Structures are given as structure tokens and as C-alpha cells.
Image (tube, rainbow, N blue to C red):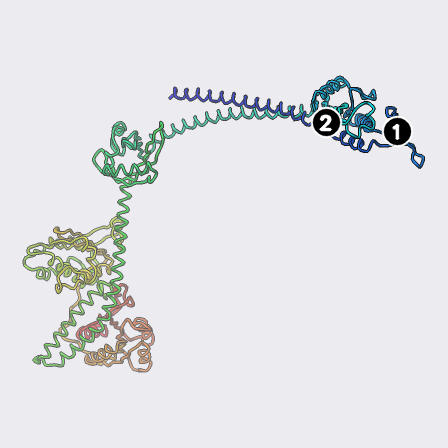
Amino acid sequence: MEDAASRVERARTRIVAISAVVWVVAIAVSFTWDWIEAGRTGKLFAETEARSAFNKDLVYRRWAARQGGVYVPPTDHTPPNPYLAHIPDRDIVTSGGKRLTLVNPAYMTRQVHELGREQYGARGHITSLRPIRPENEADAWETKMLHAFDAGVKEAISIESMDGKPFLRLMRPLVVEAGCLKCHAAQGYKEGDIRGGISVSVAYAPYLEAIGKERFQSLTAHLLIGILGLAGVWAGNVSLRRSERMLREREELFRSQFEQHAAVKLIVDPDTGGIVDANSAAARFYGWTREQLRRMKIGEINTLPPEELAEKIGEVVSGAGGRFEFRHRRADGSLRDVEVYSTKIQAKGRGYLHSIVHDVTERKRGEEDRKRLESELAQSEKMESIGRLAGGVAHDFNNMLMVILAHSEMAIEKIDPADSVHADLVEIRNAAERSAVLTRQMLAFARKQAVAPVVLDLNATVEGMYAMLRRLMGEEIDVAWHPQAELWPVKMDPGQIDQILANLCANARDAIAGVGKVTLRTENASLDDAWCARHPGCLPGEYVVLGVEDDGSGMRKETLERLFEPFFTTKEAGQGTGLGLSTVYGIVRQNNGVIEVDSEPGKGTVFRIYLPRHYGEVTKSVAGRPAVIPMGHGETILLVEDERAILELGRSLLEILGYSVLAAGTPAEAIAAVEGHAERIDLLLTDVVMPGMNGKELADRLCKVRPGMKCLYMSGYTADVIAKRGILDEQVEFIQKPFLMRDLASKLRKVLDS
């Protein structure tokens, strides 16, 4: 590690040194270029000024030459030119008497140059190798340039010292033009000859000063840029060192996190599938040492087939996937559900897979439990919906059966038993009674069956039915009974226990082909939160368990899912209604209980009914149905029924039983009847479910008017008006439709005589 770091340090130092040298050379080259360019630019500006001055002088000289010179008044500054004495009209007098003297182009140019030198410092000089005036005599540099003009040179320019100061001097030849011959023809010049030259001298010191400033600024800028560049190289070196240090720290941190992290981590070679490294958590999780894991391949842990595992590894390498759910094998052979997150990493120039493994076995079990509970909830809601439908259908059937049953019973009483019609009427009544049993089963499933629960000993109830159950099962099926001593009491209608046992035992009998065994058992049980969480609708607490076990054919999962649906049956047509187990389900749910079923094909079935423990004394048994129909004593009964057929039927039954009847088809008619009847009304016999006002509301209203009037409710469907989920309060008197005349007579006497 240290050797590698030293090599990296030396390489970085070389790179930094080379970068600094290259930067310094680049700055030096740039400064040299700027230095030369500043001098060239300054000289160019001076040349431009000189040419501008020369061109100006040349332009106005040409203008004066074209005019043949100009006449001006003679003064001390401009006396008559003695070198133009050969010109006849050098001096003239105007008609007004004003004297004028001729100023030729050369004379004018010389005066302009003198004025410019005095005011601006720029020097101009018209000269010749054969000057007329001594002032126009050429200096050494001008003489040299005039000879050069004779040799064909068109322009001369250089920087010369004049009076100890630098000047840029520009000189061009002065060519004789037609206008010049007026003054210079006497010297022998002709048009086109080089007569001399005009020189312009521009002070170069200001330009040298500007060039110096430019070069100083360039030097300053280059020094600053150079320093900044070197500082950048230094900062880059520092940053690079910091980055290398941070990289080493990150590598150390990654190594530390990898080795010490609580999560299971693996480094896998995607090409070979070998485990390159594993952290301590992986060793603890899998049960192999880290050295053993480094010698293994991922395929020895992952239970996927090799081709599928290679495909998953390819997905991570290509970037198409990174999260997977697998099953991993541990050293002890156990399998665990895991969730794996894999990413690509680079190390030593190669690609590897960094995998984080989470054990999700318990979570998956929880998810499975949640799905199971959701399924059970959906099944419960489905059963609720079917129950509401069944309850509504049973209500309508009960009204129709009431008419059939009562009329057949009255007809039987009127016809001689020897008459053949009597037997037919008995069959009609029996069929109606069997149909009434079916509707009661439907109401039981819907939890709308009106019941009067009492506190009972479940052992005593089962023992009371034991003989009947043995007969029901037949001789080939052994019925075993295992009651628990000191069984807790429960509160429910004894008839419902009879229905549960009869239906479950009948179901067990049908599941046994030939010889078999059915076991009845009771026991106390305390159900905790965990158990109730797996059984929707169950609350933790103490329960009494009624179990019915058989060694019959058992049931498939598909059958278990629909076991309690009304009219669902696996029996052949005509061998069952499909209401037996749905009746059991409804009764258990009506009493806040839970039903549990365990069954497998060929292994029999176990039903366990969990009923809430009740704290109270067991209720003594009540007397059964009287042998003789009890008659009325002329008491007045207010009959209220919205079904006209049942209303008329009820009137007839009550009159047969010896009662005086006030009949009303609606609650409003009943109220009017009470208001119009001044005498005593002993009892209100009313339907429960009626439009506009239910039976409970009607009874409450009428009892305020007639406080001594007693009340008996009748209905095929209570609709939770007088009972909560079908369970009647102790002070509520109720008779279930359809009913026999004997049952109605007994119930009336019980209420009136109470």
C-alpha cells in the first residue's frame, strides 16, 4: 500500500513540475510577443502621423502651385521673396492702391513648417540638392535620402536623433509639376524631374512613453497571470493530494463499513460467480467462515438454477436490474428468503458486484399471513352479503308458508280423518313445516333467526342429544364422547346447539363410507391476540370449544373455501339442501363465536366451535309444548299485519281460539282502531317489518295510550328491530313465522297470563 502511494506521489510531482515549466515558458513567449508588438504598434502610429502631415503639406502645396502662388500683403514676416525677383509680376498694386507680393508654393510651405514647429513641435522641411534659399539646404540624413530618390527610392523613413531627441523622420521626393515651372524653370527643371524632397519629423518620445506603458502593463499582466497559473498548478496539486487522501479514506471507510456493517454483504465476480469477499455479518448469517466463503461460488448459496442465476447477474452488469428475491442456503442446510440489492463497483480496474443481503423470511411470513387474513375478510364479507340475501328471501317465504301452513291446519281440523282429503292436507302441512325448517336455516345463516338465549351447560346439552345422535349416525359409525370436567357455561338458545350438533354429525356421517368413528369433545380454551389475528371476528378471551371429529374422506382446499356458502353441496342431487353447514356458520357468528375447520383428503375433518364463556348460573330447563291447545277467554287482541292474506288468516285463527279481534292492515289503521275502541284491549299482536312504521315503534306509541296492553311480536325476519342480530331481550315476547295454531295459542296464553 505504501509503495503504491509513493509511486503515485512521485508521478504526481513530475506532472506538477512539467506543468509549471510549460506554463512559465508559455507566459514568457506571450510576453515577448507583446513586447515586440507594442514597439511595432507605437512606430506604426508615429508613421501614420508623419504620413498624415506629409500628405497635408503636399495637398495644400499642389493647390498653391495650381493657382500659380498666392498674393499677400508684404510684412516683416512675409517680405517680398528676393529669389522670385526674376518674375515680372512678383509685386503688384491693386486698383485701390494696395501693395501685394507673390508667395509661391515653396515659400508658403516653408512658412507653414516654421509655424507648425513653433506651435506643435512637428517639423517639416522642403529641401533640395540645389536649393534656391539657404534655409532649404538639406541636412546629412536628407542629403542621403535625396541621393536615394535619384536611385529610385520612393520613400524614406527611420528614427533619428535631432537636437538630442528621438524623431521619426519621413521623406518623399518632390516631383516637378506644371505649376512649379513658373518659379523654377530658370533653374533648368522640367516637368517630372525630382527637384528635391519634403521631410516630416515627428517627435518620437511620446510614442516611446506609450510603448513603455504598454509593455509595463503587459509585463504586469503576464506576471499576474503567470503567478495565478503557478498558483493554479499548486492548488491543483493540493487538490489532487486531497482527492487521493479522500479516495484512500473512502476506500478505508468502504472497507470498514463492508467488514463491520451489520448487514450481510458480499463481493462477487460476475465473470466466474466466485465470492471475492464477505463481511463478518455474512459469516454469521450463513454459518461459514469468511475464508470458506471466499473459496465458494454464489451458486453454492443461491438456490436458483445456474442459467437463471447467470441471467440475474447479467441484469446487474447491464444496469437493467438491481433488486432480487432469492432463497439462500446456509451451512446448516436451512433455507432463508432473502432480498438482495446488487450494484456494480470498480476495483483494480475490474468490475465486481456489491450485494447487500436482507433476511426477509419473517416479513414474507407476515405478508402471507396478511394475504390470508385479507382472503378471510373477503370471505366473511361475501358470507355477509349472501346472508342478507338469504334473510330477505326467507322473510318472503315465511309469509307464504304462513298462509299455507295455517289454512292446511284449519282445514285438517274441519275434515273427518277418515276422509281421503284429510291425508292430503296432512301432507301439505308436513311439506310446509319442512319448508319452514329450510327458511329457519336460511335465517340462521343470516343471523336473523329470532332466538331466546339462556345460560346452559354445554356438556349437559350434548349428553341430552347423545342418544339421538347415535341413532342418526347408524350402527357402523362409533360415536365417542369426551367432555371436559368443570366446563365453563355459555349463553345461547338450546335449540341452536341442537342444530349445530345435528348438522355437523350428519355431515360427518355422509363423509364416512362404511365403518368409521365420530368424536364429540368439549374443552375450555383461552385465545390470545396471535390466535385471534388469524381468525377475523374473534376477540381474545376465554371460550368453550365444541369439537366434532370424523375419520371420513376429508375435503379439498377448493371445497373448504366455499364450505359455508348457502346451497353449496358436494352431494348428489336430492341428498342435501346445502344449508346445513351454512346454518352452523350463522348460529356461531350470531353468538359471537368462531368456527375452525381442519381437513385434508383422506385424513378426515375436524370442526371446532369456539363459543364465548358466560359468567352466570346455568338456566333451568323449561317445559315443552302442551298436549292440549289452550283456548282464549274472550280477551280482545289488536292484530296488525300488512299482508292482507295473513291478516285475514290471523283473524280466523284468533277467533277459532276464542279471542275477540280488532284487525288492522297498517300501523295507521291500528292507531285509529285504538282511538275508536273505548273498551279494554288486552294484547297487541303485530308484525315487525311494516312500511311507514315498524312493529316496535307502533307498540311504543300504543302502549303510551293503553299502558296495560301487552305485546306479542310476530315476523319471519326481525331486521334488528326487536332483536340485535336476532337475539331477543328477555322482556320481548316473539313468535317466529310460520307457526302452527297450537304454537300461537300457547304463546298467547303465556303472554296474557304472565
Residue 275, label in figure: none
Q: Is residue 106 above or below residue 586?
A: above
Within the image, what quadrant is residue 720 found in? Answer: bottom left
If the image is split into quadrants, where does the N terminus sit? top left
The first of marks 2 and 1 along the sequence is: 2
If the image is split into quadrants, where does the C terminus sit? bottom left
The residue located at (33%, 76%) in the rendering is: 705
Q: Which of 249 and 93 is in front in this view?
A: 93
Within the image, what quadrant is residue 656 found in? Answer: bottom left
| Figure label count | 2
Horizontal side, residue 143 vs residue 667: left or right: right
Mark 2 lies on residue: 50
Horizontal side, residue 442 vs residue 170: left or right: left
Crowd rating for badge 2 (residues with CA inside 10 Å; few <14, some 14–19, many 20+)? many
Mark 1: amino acid? Arg
Q: Is residue 489 above or below residue 704?
A: above
Residue 90, label in figure: 1
Q: Which dot, 2 or 1, sits closer to the camera?
A: 1
How far apart are the alpha carbons under marks 2 and 1? 33 Å
Mark 2: amino acid? Ala
Q: Is residue 468 above or below residue 207?
A: below
Q: Position of residue 108 (x, y in %)?
A: 82, 28
Within the image, what quadrant is residue 314 found in? Answer: top left
Q: Nearer the viewer, residue 582 or 529?
A: 582
